[in-house]
Image: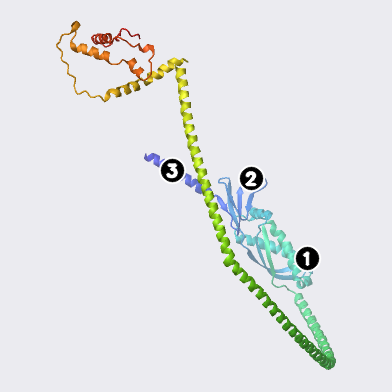
Amino acid sequence: MDLTLILVISVIVIGLGTIIFFFSRYQKCPSDRILVIYGKTGGEGRSSNCMHGGAAFVWPVIQAFEYLDLTPMSIEIPLEGALSKQNIRVNTPSTFTVGISTEAGVMSNAAERLLGQNLSQISNLAKEIIYGQMRVVIATMDIEAINADRDVLIEKIRDGVEVELTKVGLKLINVNIQDITDESGYIEALGKEASSRAINDAKVQVAQRERDGNIGQADAQRDQRIQVSAAQAQAVEGENLAKVKVAESDAARREKEAEAERLASAAEKVKQAQALEEAYTSEQKAEVERAERDKSTQYADVVVPAEIEKQKIETLAEADAEKTRRLKKGEADGIQSVMEAEAKGILATLQSKAQGFSDIVKAAGGAADDATLLLVTEQLPALVEEQVKAISNLKIDSVTVWDSGKGEGGKTDTANFVSGLVGALPPLHALTKNVGIELPEFLGKLSDNPVGAAKIIEKAKAKTVDHAPEVPGAEA
C-alpha cells in the first residue's frame, strides 16, 4: 500500500514537473527586446529565428534562446583633426543615438554579430563605425560647405553611417553636431568675414528702411489731408441729402396718416353696419331655434311616450305569442321524443329477442320444435314455483294418523295413506297443463293409475340410490 502511494505521488510530481518545464519553455517577447531562438530552427541558411513581440515555444535540447536589448545608446564622438577636401583639419564633436534595429533582415544581422554582447560592447563597436564614416564624409566636403550647410553635412553623415550600422544590426536614431572648428582658424576667419558682411548689409538695409520710412510718412500726410477734405465735402453733401430725405419722409408720413385715418373711419362704419346685420340675423336664428325647441319639447312630452307605450304593448304581445309557440313546440317535441324513445326501446327488445331465438334455433341444429322444448324446459322451475305458491298459503296445523299396523295386502295403513296421497297429487304433466303448456314426450307421459304410481314409489325406496326409478305406464 505504501509502495503504491509512493509510486502515485512520484508520477504526479514527475507529471507536474514536466508540465512546468514545458510551460517555462514557452517564451513571451517583451516590446523592448528581441527574442532570438537559435539551434535547430528548421530553415536552410538560417542561423536563428528573431521575433520582436509575440511568443514562441522553445524546444528543449535542440533549441535555446537569448534576448537582445533595444535600449537606445547615446554615443559621444569627439572627432578632431579630420582632413577636409582642402586638407584642412576640422574638429566636429558630435552625439549619435543608435539602437538595435527591429527590421526583419537587420534583426538577423544583430543576432549573428551582437548576440551575447552587452550595451557597452555594442556602443564601442558603433563608435568605431561612426568615427570611420565621419572622416570619409568630411574628406569629401569643402570647409565652406561644412561650415555653411550643416543639414547637408548631417544628411551625408547619416547616409554613410546608417549603411555601415545596418551591417551589424544597428539603426541610427539621431545625429547632433555640436560645433565645427579648425586648427588654422580658417573657419573663424570665414565667420568674421561673414559677420562683417552681415553688419554692412544690415547698415545699408537700415538706411534704406529709414529713407523708405520718411517717404512713406510724407505720402501718408498728403493722403491724409486729401482724404480729410474729401470726407468733409462728402459729409456736407450727405447732410443736405439727409435733410431732403427727412422732408420727403415727413410728407409721405402725413399723407399716409390721412389715408389711414380715412380708411379707419370707413372701416369702422362698415363694421358697425355688419354688427347690426349680424345681430338681426342672430335674433332671427334664435327665434327659429326657440320654435324648434318648443316643437321638440311637445314631441318629447306627448308623441314619444305614446310611441314608447305602443312599442311596449306590441313587444309584450309578441313575447307572449313567442312564449306560447315555444311551449307548444316544446311539448310536442317532448312527446315526440318520448314516443320515439319508447319505439326505439321496443324495437331494440324485439330485435334482441329475435336474435336470441335465432341463436337458440341454430344451437338446436335448425329444428324449431327442439328449440321450443329448450325454452319450455328453461321456464319449468318458474312454473313449478308459481304452482307451489298457489297452495303455500294453506295452513295445516297437524296431521294425525292412527295406524293399527295391519292393512290390506300386508301394507300398513300409513303406507296406503302415502300411496293415496301420491296418487292424489297432480303429476308434472297435469301441472303444466294447468298453465296451458304440454310437455314433450321425452319427459314421459301422464299415467292414469295412481295406485301403480304409489307402488312404484315404494319400490324406489327399496332400491339403491344409484339406480334410476322405473315407472310403469311412463315412457322415458
Kindly identify the amino acid type of the residue bearing the numbered disc 1. Answer: Thr
Q: Which residue is mark 3?
A: 10
Q: Is residue 6 left or right of residue 347?
A: left
Q: Which residue is mark 2?
A: 42
Please tell me which residue lies in front, 275 or 4. 275
Please tell me which residue lies in front, 119 or 476. 476
Res 229 visible: no
Q: Where residue 431 appears, x then y in whole percent?
A: 33, 18
Closer to viewer: mark 2 or mark 3: 3
Residue positioned 67% across, 75% down in the render: 285
Q: Which residue is mark 1?
A: 140
Q: Return the disc, 2 or 1, that comes first in the chain's sequence.
A: 2
Determine whether 13 is above or below 407 in the image: below
Q: Where residue 457 appears, x then y in whole percent?
A: 26, 11
How many marks can you see? 3
Kindly identify the amino acid type of the residue bearing the numbered disc 2. Answer: Gly
Alpha carbon separation for disc pair 2 and 3: 35 Å
Please tell me which residue lies in front, 410 or 435. 435
Q: Secondary structure at mark 2?
A: loop
Alpha carbon separation for disc pair 1 and 3: 74 Å
Determine whether 102 is above or below 196 in the image: above
Q: Secondary structure at mark 1?
A: loop
Q: Is residue 401 left or right of residue 331?
A: left
Q: Return the disc, 1 or 3, that comes first in the chain's sequence.
A: 3
Q: Is residue 109 left or right of residue 194?
A: left
Residue positioned 78% across, 79% down in the render: 194
Determine whether 281 is above or below 344 in the image: below
Quadrant of the image containing the N terminus: top left
Please tell me which residue lies in front, 219 or 163. 219
Kindly identify the amino acid type of the residue bearing the numbered disc 3. Answer: Ser
